[in-house]
Image (tube, rainbow, N blue to C red):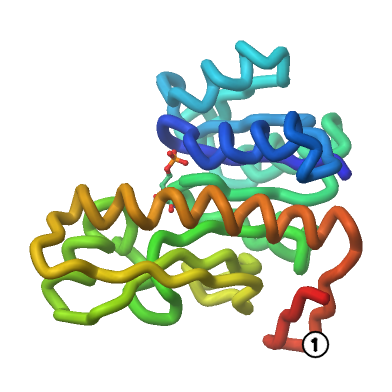
């Protein structure tokens, strides 16, 4: 299974996917790493692993359709079968969502549908979780549809919110779980163990 990873940041989730492949937990190949940020750490990780590392951003194009066409072409060129959004902060064009229906996975650092949606990313999530007084948080892998963080949930794992947690402490605890469940979800897709009925997704 060829995975196309999209990332905007340092790429620890991308690295965790590569680790799972190297440890033979996940039988797959990352055929493309794409980032909208030319200085993303994820691009460096891809280069170090001789994985095609492409900077592709709306800013490089005169309009949305030409950007979307370039993204679609890139996915085709690298024979991407499943897209993993590993800290990718841009919306996926609707035409790509449709082309890859039920084949785009996103990792979110909270237990959706709580603490999700526009603007809920990175430290903003953990600040909101702590401010709300909830006693558990965690990570969610979900299918990507046309709405931010709204797609059907594939896997979740909870962590405790501790009394004196700072957003950074909570983020670090959640990140470990992100790394764990993202690879498990991709493994299930690679092994064809995912059943999808409308909004209900279950791993056998
Ligand atoms: C992670 O917290 C992920 O949940 C969110 O963005 C962050 C990406 O971190 N979508 P990294 O670049 O994978 O380290």
114 relative to 95, above or below: below
**Residue on which disc 1 sits:** 197
Q: Quadrant of the N terminus?
A: top right
4 relative to 60, above or below: below
Relative to the observer, which residue lies in front, 180 or 82? 180
Asked whether the viewer can see residue 73, the reply is no
Tell me what residue is drawn at x 85 percent, y 30 percent: 77
Q: Quadrant of the C terminus?
A: bottom right
Where, by quadrant of the figure, is residue 26 drawn?
top right
Tell me what residue is drawn at x 45 percent, y 21 percent: 38
Relative to the observer, which residue lies in front, 179 or 29? 179
Percent x, y of residue 41: 45, 23
Where, by quadrant of the figure, is residue 47 drawn?
top right
Tell me what residue is drawn at x 70 percent, y 35 percent: 70
Q: Is mark 1 within 8 Å of ligand 1?
A: no
Percent x, y of residue 188: 79, 61
Looking at the image, residue 78 sits to the left or right of residue 11; the answer is right
Looking at the image, residue 153 sits to the left or right of residue 38; the answer is right
């Amino acid at each position: 299974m060829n995975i196309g990873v999209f990332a905007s940041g340092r790429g620890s989730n991308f690295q965790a996917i590569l680790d799972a492949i190297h440890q033979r937990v996940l039988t797959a190949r990352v055929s493309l790493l794409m980032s909208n940020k030319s200085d993303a750490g994820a691009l460096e990780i891809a280069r170090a692993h001789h994985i095609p590392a492409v900077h592709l951003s709306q800013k490089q194009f005169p309009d949305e359709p030409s950007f979307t066409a370039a993204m679609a072409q890139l996915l085709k060129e690298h024979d991407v079968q499943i897209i993993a959004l590993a800290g990718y902060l841009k919306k996926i064009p609707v035409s790509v969502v449709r082309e890859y229906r039920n084949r785009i996975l996103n990792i979110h650092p909270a237990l959706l549908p709580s603490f999700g949606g526009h603007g809920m990313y990175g430290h903003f999530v953990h600040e909101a979780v702590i401010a709300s007084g909830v006693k558990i948080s965690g990570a969610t892998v979900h299918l990507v549809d046309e709405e931010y963080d709204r797609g059907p949930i594939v896997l979740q794992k909870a962590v405790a919110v501790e009394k004196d947690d700072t957003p950074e402490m909570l983020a670090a605890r959640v990140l470990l779980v992100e790394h764990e469940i993202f690879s498990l979800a991709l493994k299930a897709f690679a092994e064809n163990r995912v059943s999808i009925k409308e909004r209900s997704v279950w791993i056998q």
